[in-house]
Amino acid sequence: MKRWIAIGLVVLVLGGIIVYNKVLHPAPGATSGGPGGGGKDGGKGGPGGPGRGPTPAVNGFIVVAQNLREDVVSSGSLLAAEQVDIYPELSARITQLNIREGQPVAKGALLVKLFDADLRAQLQKLQAQADNARRTEERNKQLLDRGGISQQEYDIVTTNLRSSLADIELVKANLQRTEIRAPFSGVIGLRNVSPGAVVTPNTLIARLQQVSSLKLDFSIPEKYGSAVRVGSSISFLVDGARQPSQGIVYAIEPGVEEQTRNLRIRARVSNGSMTYRPGTFARVTLTIQNEKSLVVPTQAIIPQTRTNQVVVVKDGKAQFKDVTTGLRTAGAIQILSGLSAGDTVATTGLLFLKQDTPVKIGRVITLPNMNSAKSASTDPKVATR
């Protein structure tokens, strides 16, 4: 029984070999009528050999210099140009409150007056003592000139006069502390006290803000730090606004934040029409680069381990070239080296092309939106570069 099984297996193997050689893989010339190629397919056996297909057609793009812009998009906050919380310097009762909530005030305007009757009485007392000390000093000066008193006695008198004058200056300083004046022109906020209230140095009376111009604070990744300078223009958009507004960078933080590796930047924004309010969130766009560069479509780039390649179609043949890339937008990539203006690069069929293989351009494509910006951001809600 085992012998018959072995014989059957041998027959099956030999039969399979015969079918493969005769049917599935015939010898050269077996189907073409012999060496002369006179069979059914003999007309395809000319120069070039059997199996030669048509030249592949690909889409091409002519390399040109176009405007390529890179923008950095970040989140920022609008701040008042100047802001101060108004606190009293003394514990006293409010005798005069000149705060009109939400209204503009001029620099130096009296906002709050505290009770000062005790200080004014003390000032009068000290002034009387100072007048007496001044007359005493004048009499002792004459006695000293005639030798009636010693120099030491005269020095004591002059010391008493200077002490009285110093006490007067101290009381005057305390009187000034009973008056709270606006340190700059701005808009006063909501007050937290009423006339007649007794306040302490911990009592917040109101907040004064200068809003005719605003500051806009935002951050960008540290790699863009060298491209930002004082005087650079920025645009920003706030919620509810239809059109973006402009600002000018006027200050850059000297150091980078260690935790985020971002660079803080401050711009100045005009707010003459009081359109914006301090504390408003703003989406900031900072243009890092805007210049003409050689660009190719993103689909023309073939990523390699250490470099990038493109297929240049020249004289009807495919040529692979290494290129150095730069900025990247949604539809284009900047070419720093490796290509020249006027070169034609293939954008389709890249997987089927080989070096020096014949190829023809079926259609030339264009990218009208190649100057659209690629956004980088420090805002997690914005796609980063």
Image (tube, rainbow, N blue to C red):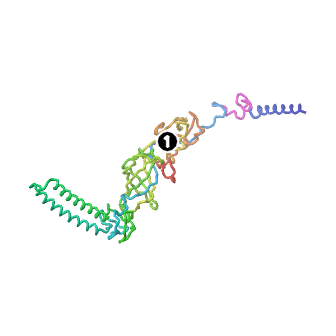
Q: From the viewer's perspective, tell me whether residue 7 is left or right of residue 90.
A: right
Q: Where is residue 54 in the image (x, y as percent from the top left)?
A: 61, 37
Q: In which quarter of the image is residue 95?
A: bottom left
Q: Nearer the viewer, residue 146 or 232?
A: 146
- The residue segment tinted magenta is 26-45
Residue 13 in the magenta stretch? The answer is no
What x and y, as percent, mark residue 207?
Answer: 38, 63
Q: Is residue 294 placed above or below 84 in the rendered structure?
A: above
Q: Which of 7 and 16 is in front in this view?
A: 7
Q: Does 3 appear above or below 136?
A: above
Q: 279 or 6: nearer the eye?
A: 279
- Tell me the quadrant of the picture where the N terminus can be found: top right
Residue found 12% across the figure and 60% down from its top: 139
Task: Name the magenta segment's main secondary structure.
Answer: loop
Visible residue check, residue 273 = no
Which residue in the structure is indicated by mark 1? 62
Residue 84 percent coordinates (x, y): 36, 60
Identify which amino acid the numbered label 1 is placed on: Ile
Relative to 105, residue 229 above or below: above
